[in-house]
Image (cartoon, rainbow, N blue to C red):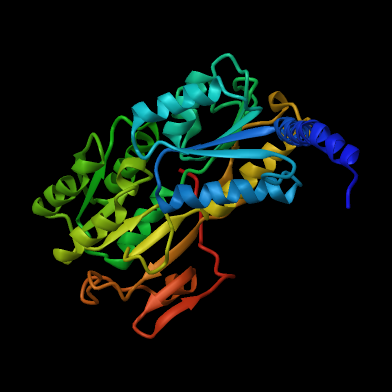
Amino acid sequence: MIPTNALAFLRRSVPTVALLTVASALLLLTDRQSAKRDLPAIAVLQQTSSQVLEDAVKGMIEGLAERGWIDGKTVTIRRYNAEGDMAQANAIAQEIAGGPFDLVLTSSTPSLQAVATANSRGRLKHVFAAVADPFSAGIGLDRADPLVHPPHIVGYGSLSPVNATFQIARRLNPRLARVGAAHNPSEANSRRYMELARASCKALGIELLEAPVENSSGVIEAVQSTIGRGAEAIFVPGDTTVVSTIESVIATAAKSGVPVFSVNPAKPDRGTLFDVGCNFHEVGLVAGRLAADLLSGTDPKTVPIRETIREIPPYLVLNLATASAGPDRWQAPDDLKKQARYLIDQTGRHDQPDAILAGPFDE
């Protein structure tokens, strides 16, 4: 039996003990939260949920982790997605620029532009990737000198070889005369791709049937308009607006027996006749590694703007089994089949990881 005086002591002490226990718990929690806030913080912004941009962001995060910058352990990473809305992208960029971040990574040209504007004072270091032609993005770069750039912005251009893409289309169909292309003229990346497409088509004697769009809701109607004007194939440029709807583009074109080709390789069996471009996971990897270097002390002023095509050769995806690629019109020479990293034909899918696409790729 516990003595009466001992019981009285316990009654008086329990509230104090409970209070001390709660206080200790709060202090421990505060210490943990403080330690978490002490980690470097990174924001990642992508313009839309397309496979290309998803692959790039995944690569960015893996590139950081390769160098020891692991989310939740040595760094905190917060992802943002504008879901194709430029006004939302600008609002998110303002939030990032004024937020508790040390560095921002962007995936796509619109995301690059939004953050470059919001972060014009250079409070945050900024690494970009999945940008076709950063030199035409209006952010202060100089095509003649890769070291000329805002002191806080560095990254990689990933312009796919448009001329090589149209040459492959002509090889697959020597009689190809008309190609349709929906595009958003407000996107700097899209303007660059269409400029190159016009030059390539002119050189090859192909009529390029253009259909400008303002947003993703107008893409399908635009594609249908080019088919109605006689397009024998649909070209999908590096256009964020159009790429975000590419599955619908493929389905719409297929109903008219018209194949689709692009400069955005993704799933080999998604239904495009062929794709020529960079592996955007690898594009993201090099950007993530660069971001890791900046976190480790590299001065971005000393880093030139780079072209991923110099480090990551473009590759070919060739799907000869797609229903819209009628064998009477579209046939691949054997040497081209050997150059495809992924080849799909009537016998199935053939992965050829060592396949090299023949150049040159200078535009």
- Pick the residue in front: 133 or 27: 27
Please identify the residue farthest to the top as the structure is shown: 121
- Above or below 124: residue 323: below
Decide if residue 309 is in sight here: no
Q: Quadrant of residue 303?
A: top right
Counting every numbered tag in the picture gives 0
Residue beneath the point at 31% across and 29% down? 186
Rendered location of residue 290, percent (x, y) = 68, 39
Horizontal side, residue 40 vs residue 214: left or right: right
Q: Does residue 225 show up? A: yes
Image quadrant where residue 88 sits: top left
**Is 318 on the left or on the right of 2, as rendered?**
left
Q: Nearer the viewer, residue 259 or 98?
A: 98
Residue at the image position 25 percent from the left and 70 percent from the top: 325
Quadrant of the frame with the C terminus: top left
Which residue is rendered at x = 53% and y = 74% of the image? Answer: 352
Q: Residue at x 25, y 63 (%)?
A: 259
Residue 142 drawn at (x, y percent): 55, 24
- Rendering coords of residue 85 (x, y %): 33, 34
Q: Nearer the viewer, residue 134 or 16?
A: 16
The residue at the far bottom in this view is 347
Foreground: 306 or 289?
A: 289
